[in-house]
Amino acid sequence: MRWDRVKLLLEHLSGLGLSRNDYSSFFVGEKFVPEKVQKHTVRTNCMDCLDRTNVVQSTLAHWYLQQQLEDDKIIKEGQDWSIVDPKFLFVFQNIWADNADAVSTSYSGTGALKTDYTRTGKRTKLGALNDLSNSISRYIKNNYRDGSRQDGYDLFLGNVLPYEIATSPFPDDL
């Protein structure tokens, strides 16, 4: 719940050489000409929490977008785009929160936690209550109803090879 830590992460990454200028851009005309080529990649994987991963990724996207809008002269240097255009900020935040919900649903069977922060930049009591509901649903699904989903992941990842086992781990529910 320490959202200020994400900003410290950005400062740490900057100290390691990451720059807001480190993104690719292209001129599209008769030819597709690269103007700027990205040199770094940030791999975000919070060890135990897909939801925190999305918070970090959305913060990085916000950080990079600031520089891209400045470089394209859409905003003045140092002018915070999220203050200049609150409607665009609303769309930006909701796209990230919707993405978090989609990814989380595929992994856990529920929408993401902490989307109130991703959507609004603030943690709310209603968001915490929604997280409690999702957490209870996740617990029940993961411990009692998630076998077929795990079997599907195991099959996809090659952890289960159907031709090597005597009985199928995929029961027919018909």
Image (tube, rainbow, N blue to C red):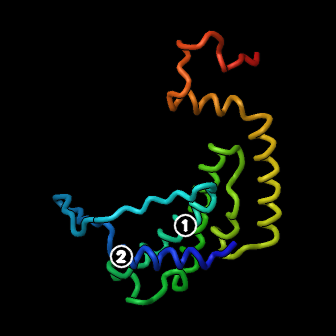
Residue toward you, 171 or 17: 17
Tell how many labels. 2
Q: Is residue 146 visible?
A: yes
Q: Is residue 147 left or right of residue 74?
A: right
Q: Which mark is residue 168?
A: none
The numbered disc on residue 56 is: 1
Percent from the top left, x then y, of residue 58?
Answer: 53, 67
Front residue of this view, candidates 9 and 61: 9
Position of 132 compared to 117: left or right?
right
Per the image, label 1 sits on a secondary structure element best described as helix
Q: Dividing the picture into quarters, in which one does residue 129 lie? A: bottom right
Crowd band around label 2 with a 10 angstrom C-alpha radius: few (<14), some (14–19), many (20+): some
In the rendered image, is residue 68 in sight? no
Residue at image point 44% right, 59% down: 43
Q: Amino acid at mark 2?
A: Ser
Q: Position of residue 6 (x, y in %)?
A: 56, 74
Residue identifier under label 2: 19
Q: Answer with the quarter of the image where residue 117 lies.
A: bottom right
Quadrant, the N terminus: bottom right
Indicate the position of residue 103 as horizontal and vertical percent values.
59, 49
Determine the residue positioned at 77% across, 59% down. 131
Q: Quadrant of the C terminus?
A: top right
* Foreground residue among 149 and 154: 154
Q: Tag 1: Cα neighbours inside 10 Å, few (<14), some, or many (≥20)? A: many
**How far apart are the two marked residues, 1 and 2, measured between alpha carbons?**
16 Å
Of 117 and 69, which appears nearest the observer? 117
Picture residue at 57% right of the left edge, 30% below the top: 154
Residue placed at 64% from the left, 50% from the top?
104
Q: Earlier in the sequence, mark 1 or mark 2?
A: 2
